[in-house]
Image: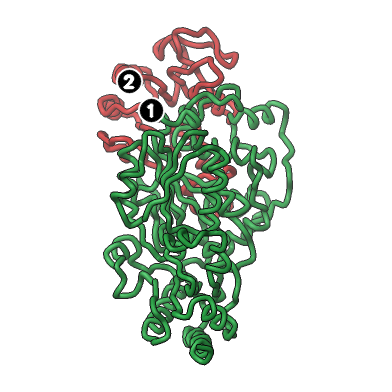
Amino acid sequence: MRVKLVNLERYQQPDVIRRTLTRLRVAVVGLSGNQLRASNFVGYYLLRHGYDVVPINPRESEIFGRRCFPSLADVPEPVDTINVFRDPSVVPALAEEAVAVGASCLWLQFGVISEQAAEIASAGGLDVVMDRCMKIEHARYIGRMHWLGFNTGTISAQRRTPR
Amino acid sequence: MKDRDFGFATRTVHAGSRPDPTTGARALPIYQTTSYVFEDTESAAAYFNLQEYGNTYSRIMNPTVAAFEERVANLEGGVGAVAFASGLAAQSAVLFTLLRPGDHVVTSSALYGGTVTQFKHVLGKLSVKLDFVDPDDMDAWRAAISPDTKLLFAETIGNPGGNILDIEAIAKLAHDHDCPFMVDNTFATPYLCRPLDWGADIVVHSATKFLGGHGTSLGGVVVDRGDFDWSNGRFPVVADPSPAYHGLQFHETFGVYGFLMKLRTETLRDLGAAMSPFNAFLLAQGIETLPLRMRQHVANAQVVAEFLSAQPGVVKVAHPGLATSIYRPLVEKYLPEGTGAVFCFDLPGGRQAGSSFIEALTLFSHLANVGDAKSLVIHPASTTHRQLSDEELARAGIATGTIRLSIGIEDSNDLIWDLQQGLDACESNS
């Protein structure tokens, strides 16, 4: 079982997650070109579901046929969400960059846990989501996670998609 | 802001089943289809590569079955569930997913006879080693664990001895040895006990029983809590690159959903014991009344057990809800709302008394099932546990005159009237 050093629940608020999912320009930091890596699964999924995915990886020039940037600072257009697949130790610096580029949300994937990064991003006015997968949360609230018997935790008698 | 934490009864009715977005149908639609048309070739590839949640073939997934799965996962507090054609199919799928030749399983000896047979014979053929232990004896559990142990297993309420499992203690022992702990929660249902809340990693059900409640449909389901560390070095079967998916690493890629993805897209796909959509519909329908039924089952079983304990012609009533039960502390901790409705009692007259009793009954159905809305009776030594040796029978707490009851939701005074007929017949034949 994972030891919980950070109050993760604070950074896993459903309304923040749903709000973030409505913003379509997503920089995926640490996106791998290897089809079998989790980051590639997530990036590919987001692209399929209409997100404008901006790959960030200094070791690649192109992923999914899209130009890959070495760092957030190199991206010429504004981005909404910074989706992070990096070692927690480098994430505080990344949070500084996310604030500098004027992003709306710092989203840290499973296992990317950094209280310091969360504090930097929050202080800079960003929403923070931590230890959550953007693909899974999209599938939970908007997509088809319920097709595979997963517990979406969503209950509604309404025909519309929950907000 | 948190979403509302809905209560258990609300979730029995709603979880997994939102109105159909295409038609608006409020009841759960029965998607009686084998297969699904792909939007385009790229989508088809994404589904088969597991890059996208998509329907391909009903042996692997089906929207009606998925609604049942999500409902059970929600009620048990798991991250998800996979349904199977029966409880034994569900259980065997977990074994086939986790175990390799040379591995070892430690299991309670107080089990459903079909489980004992499955473990002994199927695992034996696969060269998996097996040790049965007295579920009440923590030292026995501890002593049986070896470096090859990959799974601990027991039932929340032992069948048919009524042993109450110390779930938290055994889960801790399992985790101290980097092992998952699987619990069969069929007899308790998540209404009475949620083993995942006490540290169990995997819950299995024969949904045929109380979950469905109507005795019309076979079904089984596996629920995973999702936080067992399959990448601890002991479970390459889950963590290592899968040759069946071009080297995909299930635990790394799918995180908390890794085990269930493996269970569904490899084991269920390859062994093929899928639940039918119609059964899923009936079982999901049954769950909608689970709290109402379980309250009645528990209340009736308590009245019947107290009646039997007061009868001179009955030697032992193994109902853990009785004030005299040795399991009282465990009942208070794990099953405060009641200990279910399946229990045994012994007739002193052995096999002959057992058959006289059963033949004198009017209301109880003599059959090999439990958890129906109707009251059921069986003589385990000659039926469900017939394949067991005398020694195994004794280890499972069964005597030759043991009668097992599954108390239904009828009027309890009618049940007592019927049981009195049985006891009278034993007396006149003795």
Whether residue B369 sits left or right of residue B159 in the image: it is: right
Chain that is red in the image: A
Contact check, label 2 and label 1, Cβ < 8 Å: yes
Q: Amino acid at mark 2?
A: Val
Viewer-nearest residue: B127 or B107: B127
The alpha-carbon separation of the residues under discs 2 and 1 comes to 9 Å
Instruction: Residue B11: tell me if it is visible.
Output: no
Image x and y of residue B23, in percent: 68, 53
Instruction: Residue A68: tell me if it is visible.
Output: yes
Q: Which residue is mark 2?
A: A91
Image x and y of residue A46, in percent: 54, 28
In the picture shown, does residue A66 fall above or below B333? above
Q: Quadrant of residue B52?
A: top right
Q: Which residue is mark 1?
A: A108
Instruction: Establish whether labels 2 and 1 are both on one chain.
Output: yes
Image x and y of residue B400, in percent: 49, 71
Numbered disc 2: what chain? A
Q: Secondary structure at mark 1?
A: strand
**Residue appearing at x 37%, y 41% in the figure:** A13
**Residue appearing at x 45%, y 72% in the figure:** B344
Q: Quadrant of residue B172?
A: top left
Numbered disc 1: what chain? A
Q: Secondary structure at mark 2?
A: helix
Neighbours of disc 2 within 10 Å: few (<14), some (14-19), many (20+): many
The color chain B is rendered in: green
In the picture shown, does residue B376 fall above or below A99? below
Whether residue B141 sits left or right of residue B370 in the image: it is: left
Give the image's coloring scheme: by chain
Image x and y of residue A61, in percent: 52, 7
